[in-house]
Structure formats: structure tokens, C-alpha cells
Amino acid sequence: MNTIQGYRRANGQIGIRNHLLIIPTVICANQVSSRISQLVPDSVAIPHQHGCSQIGADKDRTFNVLAGTGKNPNVGAVLIISLGCEVMNPYELADAIKAAGKPVEVLDIQSCGGSIRTIQEGAEIARRLKREIDSMEKTEIPLRELTIGVKCGGSDATSGLASNPALGHAADSLIREGGSVVIGETTEIIGAEHVLASRCVTPDVSRRLYHIVNRFEREIERMGADMRGGNPSPGNIAGGLTTIEEKSLGCISKCGTAPIQGVVEYAETLPGKGLYFMDSPGNDIECVSGMAAAGVHLVCFTTGRGTPTGSAVVPVIKITANKRMYERMSDNIDVDVSGMLDGVMGLEQAGTVIWDEIREVAGGKLTKAEILGHTEFSINRIGPSL
Amino acid sequence: MAGAIQAGVDVLVMDPKDQVATAIRDLKAGQTISYSIRGQVYQLVLKEDIPFGHKVAIHDIASGEKVYKYGEVIGRTTACIPAGHHVHVQNVEGIRGRGDQARTGQNQ
């Protein structure tokens, strides 16, 4: 089976979900956005802490994540809720998203006349947009058009020994099919960057990879503290991971063995097919939100300690090789490859189980995070609040 | 690497260069464990409990030595670690991301 059923967007991209997304431009519009979403079932709001008192690259980063999330091909239509006086310009945001060829509407709370009027008007617009996107039909789409993110979080020793190599095997399957994969978490290749750099397609890409790791490490040095305790986290350490180097060397296998075509900025669209590295923090929500803003269709997420988080616009498939955790937290975990450590499941078999799950979820099967309503969203911040 | 795990093994050595093995079940002090490197089986008596996912020294490791897992450096010992002992934050430190130390310009 080399095709899936998905949505063909006006700009030619494919979507594997058809979300109505409600974007607050600024924290001041969070409550109104959430209320509108509550009134329109199956819509999703992305409350966040940013959108004002920001300048320069920091402001641009928030804009790019909001615009990228709206442009994500899993989103069918967008309602933007603005306060009216914030730094983030709602009309520029709407124009950026409209360029992807989808309906976008804007309301601002100051012009509407307060929360209640904006909620009422917003709910009416949201219902109309929802009816519009519900009439879109699925069509057959080649798997080579799929782009996935690979991520690990709440790692323990089982991540590096088993679930990450298994995910890497599945990532290789998608690349062989002609699809794309993005790996992030610059913090979590510290100590393993030489292994990835040796797989970059050109010396320029390799230099860029070293550059972003160096930049991140200098930021950590600026904090004047040992990164151990922050990353690896207390849970990572309890799970047997001793240093960031050990964690990193276990992390990198999740992207498989393909050559690295390029290094992109946080939330930046991939410029081509194949495997890419995204400069991002290791923080689960910020990293997955950055991948979603870059336009990935879904994220595969390995965990050993267990974590419930999902994403507002992309399905997140949870994978573990920790049997005890799987038994405790099976409502959060989609794929169990713990048989690898019991010697009853080989690497290839585990990779195939994950690859099958990717195809099913891409075709519409809900992940456990989706079923439980996990729509976490978070924007990586690089400047001070003014 | 993880593709060839045999049923019933207690620990995994990821690369022949490694001085540590990772426990894939809870192990007790006094227990004799076996591990294999390139198909050859070796035995070791544990001097300390090794919890699931944690590492045990398979050789004596001197203080200040680099520690290898996956055939790569995962840190440096801060005390000597005799074979059979638990290898973790009490006796290994990270070399990278050390904002608490002056940068030497050399990462490893």
C-alpha cells in the first residue's frame, strides 16, 4: 500500500487531518479563543503566552510559529482572534496563512466590543468555516508526499537501546518511499553531533550543524550552570541516563540512517525531500510545535518514562520500549516495542510495526493523544519580555 | 545494534569499545551476569544493585578516564569504578554543556 486517504489542499499540499484552527495573536485573546473553540466541537484553539512586548527575531519567531501552524496542511480553515493593540499584526498573520490557499477570518476584541460579543461573533464565523471544511472530501495520496517529525521525550535507557533505533528503521522506510523526515532537539545532539555531521550531504551542511550546536552550548554556558539536571532531566537520570552525551548518542538513532540534506531554523519549512535537521530546543512541546509550524503531517515520539502530550494540529504517535511504563500508561502509548529488549522482537519487526502505525494514522486512525484531547502548543522564545 | 538481543539476557554491551553494560532487568549485588561482545560470552559478579536501564562497569575504570557507550564518549569518571559497580551520576560527569566550568575550547 503506497497511498493513503488524505485532503488535497488548494496549494497542492496534502493534509491528513482537517482542523478548524483558532489562533489568538496574543495572550490577551486566549480566553476568548478557548471559549469559541468550546462552542464549536472539533475546532482547536492554541492559547499561548506571547504576541506582545516582543521585538526583532523574537517577535519574528512567534509570528512564524503562529503563521506556520495556520499554514500546516492538516488545517482546513483558520479564525484569528486579536485584542487590537498587540505587537503581532493579525492582518499580516492572516495574509501569510491565506497564501496557503485556505479561508482565514480575523476578529478583534476591542472593535467587537468585549469578550462576550467577540465570543458570539467568533462562534458564528467558526461554525460557518467548519461547515465549509466538512464538505471537503478525501482523496488518494501517495505516501511520498508525507513528512514526519521524529522526537523523543521522557527518555530512559530503553529509548537509546530500542525504541529510537526502531523509529529510525521506520524513518528509513519513509525516506525510501520518497517522503521526508525532520529531527530536531539541538540540545540533545550535544556529544553526538560528529556522528550526524558525518552524514551531511555537503561540508556546508555539516558546518551549519556544528554551528547551531556550538551556539546552543554557548547559551547554556551563559547560564553558568551544568546542564545536567535540566537535561538530562531528573526523570532521565532516574531512568539510568548519566550525561547529555549519553542521552544524545541514544537520541540520534531515531532519525534512521539517511544522509542529512540540510539544517533548517525553528519552524522553517523544509526546502526539499529527505532527512533534515531543525534547530530547536529539546523541550517536547516547543520542539513538536516547531515541527508542526514547519508543516510536518505527524510526529513519532518515543518515550521511556511516559508522557501524554500531543499537538494542536498534528497527530503524535507515542512509542515505547519500556514494558513496565507501557503497562502503567497504556492509555497514552500507541506502540509497544518492548519485545525488543525481551529478545522476542527484532529491530526490523519493531520498525515495521511503527511504519504500519504511521500509515494507519496518516490514513485517519486517531492517536491516543488525539482521543484524549491533548492539543499542547508552545512557542520557543529567544528574547526578553519588554 | 538492538536487533540481535537474545531472550533472557541481563545486560547489553552496545559496542566492543564500551566499558559499561546496560541492565535490561533489575539486577542484585552478588548476582553473576553474562554479557556478550562479538559473540564471545563473558561473566561478571555484580558488586552493587543495578536497576533496570542503569549501567554497570564491565572493566575497572580509572578516575578521570573517558567512559564509552555506543562506542562513543558519554562522559568522564570522577572516581575509580571497579568492575561490577554502578556507573552513574555519583562517579561520572558530563564533559559538554558545562556552564559551571570555564570553557577550554576543547570539547572532548
Image (tube, rainbow, N blue to C red):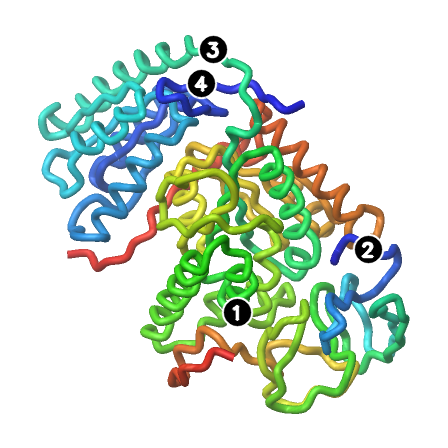
Question: Could you say where residue B28 lies in the image, as x and y percent from the top left?
Answer: 82, 73
Q: Secondary structure at mark 3?
A: loop
- Is there one chain holding both mark 2 and mark 4? no
Q: Nearer the viewer, mark 3 or mark 1?
A: 1
Q: Chain of mark 4?
A: A
* Picture residue at 28% right of the left edge, 30% below the top: A33
Residue under numbered circle 3: A137
Disc 4 to disc 1, how far (Cα)?
Answer: 41 Å
Of all chains, the one bearing label 3 is: A
* First reached walking from the N terminus: tag 4 or tag 1: 4
- The circle drawn on residue A191 is 1
> Amino acid type of disc 3?
Glu
* Residue A233 in view in this figure: no
Residue at the farthest front position: A202
Mark 4 surroundings: few (<14), some (14-19) or many (≥20) residues within 10 A: some
Q: Is residue B55 above or below residue A94?
A: below
Q: Callout 2: 10 Å neighbours few (<14), some, many (20+)?
A: few
Q: Closest to the observer: A193 or A43?
A: A193
In the image, taking residue A149 as reference, residue A133 lies left or right, namely left
Q: Secondary structure at mark 1?
A: loop
Which amino acid does the dot numbered 2 rest on? Answer: Ala
Q: Does residue A310 appear in this view?
A: yes
Chain at numbered mark 2: B
| Callouts 2 and 1 close, C-beta under 8 Å | no
- Residue to which mark 4 is pinned: A8
Front-lying residue, B65 or A114: B65
Residue type pointed to by label 4: Arg
Q: Which residue is mark 2?
A: B4
